[in-house]
Image: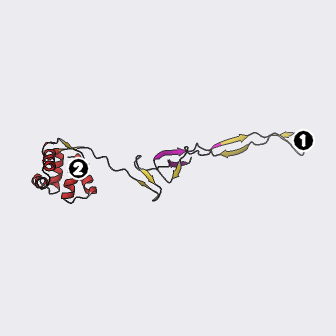
Amino acid sequence: MITRYFVDAEGNYLGPVTSAPAYTVRTPQQPVPDPETGEPVEQPPLVETVTPELVPPSGGIEVPGPPADGRAVWDFNTEEWQEPAPILPPITARQCRLMLINIGITPAMVEAEIAAIADETERACALIEWEYASTYDRHHALIDQMAAAFELPTLQVDTLWLAAADL
């Protein structure tokens, strides 16, 4: 059996296609007269191995193999799977603060950054978010603002976020 892998024109994984297994076809032969006696002599059947054709999905484009994650997208330029961004769940205020302490950022340091926000309304909103939010979403503006203030690259914040979700 042969297995091939396919994506659509946007690079979304369509899945594997496996051909049916090869099979044998036996075609009976007519008896042939024996040259000396003229008696009919049975002939062995003709044996042929048939390998069914693999039929790709409509519009499918073959790629070398499957992705590690079914949500990955095939990049036609690099000819590699582009793994999806991790799913970053909301984390609790407790998890967020423990994560920050683990990397040396104290709540007082965060509050000092919030206090340095020039716009009074923006500062008040940020303080309310910091003090009263029961959960935080990774892409909330305050999270991005604090990441920038503490010079934390996006990839590091994502990694920390996933670790915090397990605290």
- The residue range painted magenta reads 1-23
Q: CA distance from mark 1 to mark 2?
A: 97 Å
Q: Kindly indicate the quadrant of the structure image that contains residue 80.
A: bottom left
Which residue carries the number 1 mark? Answer: 38
Give yes or no for residue 79 being in the magenta stretch: no
Q: Which numbered disc flags the more N-terminal residue, 1 or 2?
A: 1
Give 5 or 136, whichever is nearer the viewer: 136
- Give, as a three-letter code, the residue at label 2: Ala
Estimate how packed mark 1 is, as few (under 14), some (14 to 19) or many (20 or more) residues with alpha carbons within 10 Å. few
Give 34 or 152, whichever is nearer the viewer: 152
Q: Position of residue 144 (x, y in %)?
A: 23, 53
* Residue 63 versus residue 34 in the image, above or below: below
Q: Name the front one of labels 1 and 2.
A: 2
Q: Kindly indicate the quadrant of the structure image that contains residue 29.
A: top right
Q: Residue at x 18, y 46 (%)?
A: 95
Task: Assign a secondary structure to mark 2.
Answer: helix
Label at residue 141 = 2
* Residue 102 versus residue 16 in the image, above or below: below
